[in-house]
C-alpha cells in the first residue's frame, strides 16, 4: 500500500509539473493557460456525456497499459501491444461476421477470439525467445510491423467491405455489439470488462504465487532463478497474459464504439500510450489504471480545447510526453537529492565527530 501511494504521489507530482510546463508553453503562444485548462477539463469531465466519452477512450489504454505493466513488472520487455491488439481486433471482426450466434454467446465468443489471437501473437515472441534465443525486446517490435502490414493488406484487399471507400471489414453482426452503458455517449460494457481485468490483475499480483514470482523476477531475475523460480515458464506466461490483454483491447474496439468493424489504423497510438501509462505507473496495476483514465480524459478534453480556444489537439500529446518525463525523472531526482543529503550528514559527522555534542561536553 505504501509503495502504491508513493507511486501515485510521484505520478501526481509529474502531472502537476507537466501542466505547469504546458502553461508556460501556452503563455508563450499568447494564450491564457487557466482558460485553456478550464476548457480542457470541462470537455473531459464537465458533464456525464463528457465523462462517459473520457471513460470510453480510456478502456484500450487501461488494457494495453496493463499488458505493458505485466511485462515490465516481471522483467519482460513486451513492446508488442500494437500487433497483439490488431490481431485480436481482426480475429473478433472475422468471428463476428462469419459466426451467427445469440447475443450472450456471441459476446463471449467475440471476446475469447480477440484474447486468444492476442495471446498467440505474444506466445510467438515467447517461442522465438526460448527456441531461437531472440530477445523479446526485438521480436515484439518486429511482430508489430508484421501485424500492421498483414492486417493492412487483408482489410485493403481480400477482407475489405465492398461498399466501403477506405480499408475496413464488413460490420460484425449486431449480436456482437457491446451493450451501451450511456444512451447519449459511447460508453459501453467494455468499461466493465476493463474493470474486471484490472481487479483480476491486482488480485493475481498480490495474492497468487505467480504474482509473487513475477515481482521477484522484476526485482532480480538471477536471484529469482537461483531461488528456484521457473523463469522460462513465467516469461512465456507474461507474454501470453500481456497478449491476451492487448487482444481484449482490440476485441472491445471492434465490438464497442460506433464502427463495429476492423478499420485499418484503428490501433492509433493506444499501444504506445499504454506503454507510457505503465511507465508512469511504475508497473503498478492501480497506478497504471489511474493514469490511463487521466490520459483518456486528456485526449477527450483536447478535442474541445481545439474547438473552443484554438489550441491544437496535439498539445495534449505534448502534455502526455511531459508527464512521462517528469514522472520518470522525479524519482531519480528525489533519490539523488536524498542520497546527497545523507552523504553530507555522514561527511559532517566524520570531519567533526561529536560536533553535535560539543556544547554539552564543554559544559561538563
Image (cartoon, grey):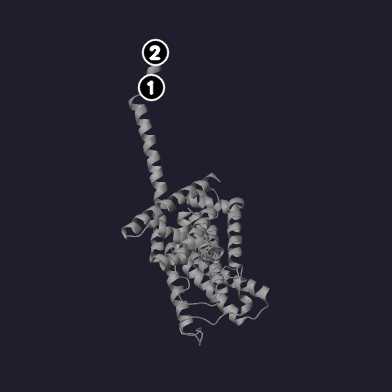
Which of the image's four quarters has the C terminus? top left
Q: Position of residue 182 (x, y in %)?
A: 60, 68
Residue 106 is drawn in which quadrant? bottom right
Q: Position of residue 150 (x, y in %)?
A: 46, 77
Depth check: give the residue in front, 31 or 92: 31
Mark 1 or mark 2, whichever is nearer to me: 2
Disc 1 to disc 2, C-alpha distance: 14 Å
Q: Earlier in the sequence, mark 1 or mark 2?
A: 1
Residue denoted by label 1: 354
Which label sits on residue 264?
Answer: none
Depth check: give the residue in front, 275 or 35: 35
Q: Position of residue 330 (x, y in %)?
A: 40, 48
Q: How many marks?
A: 2
Q: In the image as oriented, which residue stretches furthest toward the bottom?
A: 162
**Which residue is rendered at x = 37% and y = 58% of the image?**
32
Which label sits on residue 363?
Answer: 2
**Which residue is rendered at x = 52% and y = 47% of the image?**
5
Mark 1 falls on what kind of element? loop
Could you tell me if residue 104 is visible in this image?
A: yes
**Which residue is rendered at x = 36% and y = 38% of the image?**
340
Q: Position of residue 96 (x, y in %)?
A: 59, 78
The local crowd at label 2, few if under 14, some if 14 to 19, many if 20 or more residues have their Cα within 10 Å, is: few
Mark 2 falls on what kind of element? helix
Q: Answer with left or right where residue 50 lies relative to residue 343.
A: right
Q: Are marks 1 and 2 in contact (CB under 8 Å)?
A: no
Depth check: give the residue in front, 202 or 34: 34
**Which residue is rendered at x = 48% and y = 63% of the image?**
43
Amino acid at each position: 500500500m505504501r509503495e502504491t501511494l508513493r507511486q501515485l504521489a510521484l505520478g501526481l507530482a509529474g502531472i502537476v509539473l507537466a501542466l505547469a510546463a504546458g502553461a508556460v508553453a501556452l503563455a508563450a503562444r499568447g494564450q491564457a493557460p487557466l482558460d485553456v485548462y478550464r476548457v480542457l477539463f470541462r470537455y473531459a469531465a464537465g458533464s456525464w456525456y463528457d465523462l462517459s466519452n473520457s471513460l470510453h477512450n480510456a478502456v484500450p489504454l487501461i488494457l494495453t497499459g496493463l499488458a505493458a505493466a505485466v511485462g515490465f513488472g516481471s522483467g519482460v520487455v513486451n513492446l508488442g501491444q500494437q500487433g497483439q491488439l490488431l490481431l485480436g481486433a481482426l480475429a473478433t471482426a472475422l468471428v463476428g461476421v462469419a459466426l451467427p450466434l445469440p447475443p450472450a454467446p456471441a459476446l463471449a465468443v467475440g471476446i475469447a477470439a480477440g484474447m486468444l489471437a492476442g495471446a498467440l501473437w505474444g506466445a510467438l515472441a515467447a517461442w522465438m525467445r526460448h527456441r531461437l534465443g531472440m530477445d523479446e525486446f526485438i521480436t515484439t517490435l518486429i511482430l508489430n510491423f508484421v501485424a500492421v502490414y498483414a492486417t493492412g493488406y487483408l482489410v485493403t484487399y481480400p477482407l475489405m467491405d465492398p461498399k466501403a471507400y477506405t480499408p475496413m471489414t464488413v460490420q460484425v453482426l449486431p449480436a456482437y455489439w457491446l451493450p451501451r452503458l450511456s444512451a447519449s455517449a459511447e460508453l459501453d460494457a467494455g468499461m466493465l470488462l476493463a474493470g474486471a481485468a484490472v481487479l483480476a490483475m491486482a488480485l493475481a499480483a498480490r495474492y497468487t504465487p505467480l504474482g509473487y514470482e513475477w515481482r521477484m523476477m522484476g526485482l532480480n531475475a538471477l536471484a529469482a532463478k537461483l531461488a528456484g523460480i521457473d523463469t522460462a515458464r513465467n516469461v512465456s506466461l507474461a507474454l501470453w497474459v500481456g497478449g491476451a490483454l492487448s487482444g481484449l483491447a482490440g476485441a472491445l474496439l471492434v465490438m464497442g464504439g460506433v464502427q463495429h468493424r476492423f478499420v485499418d489504423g484503428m490501433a492509433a497510438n493506444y499501444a504506445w500510450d499504454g506503454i507510457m501509462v505503465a511507465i508512469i505507473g511504475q508497473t503498478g496495476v492501480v497506478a497504471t489504471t489511474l493514469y490511463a483514465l487521466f490520459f483518456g480524459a486528456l485526449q477527450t478534453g483536447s478535442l474541445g480545447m481545439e474547438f473552443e480556444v484554438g489550441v491544437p489537439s496535439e498539445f495534449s500529446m505534448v502534455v502526455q510526453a511531459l508527464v512521462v518525463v517528469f514522472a520518470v525523472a522525479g524519482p531519480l531526482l528525489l533519490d539523488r537529492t536524498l542520497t546527497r543529503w545523507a552523504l553530507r550528514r555522514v561527511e559532517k559527522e566524520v570531519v567533526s565527530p561529536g560536533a553535535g555534542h560539543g556544547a554539552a561536553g564543554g559544559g561538563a
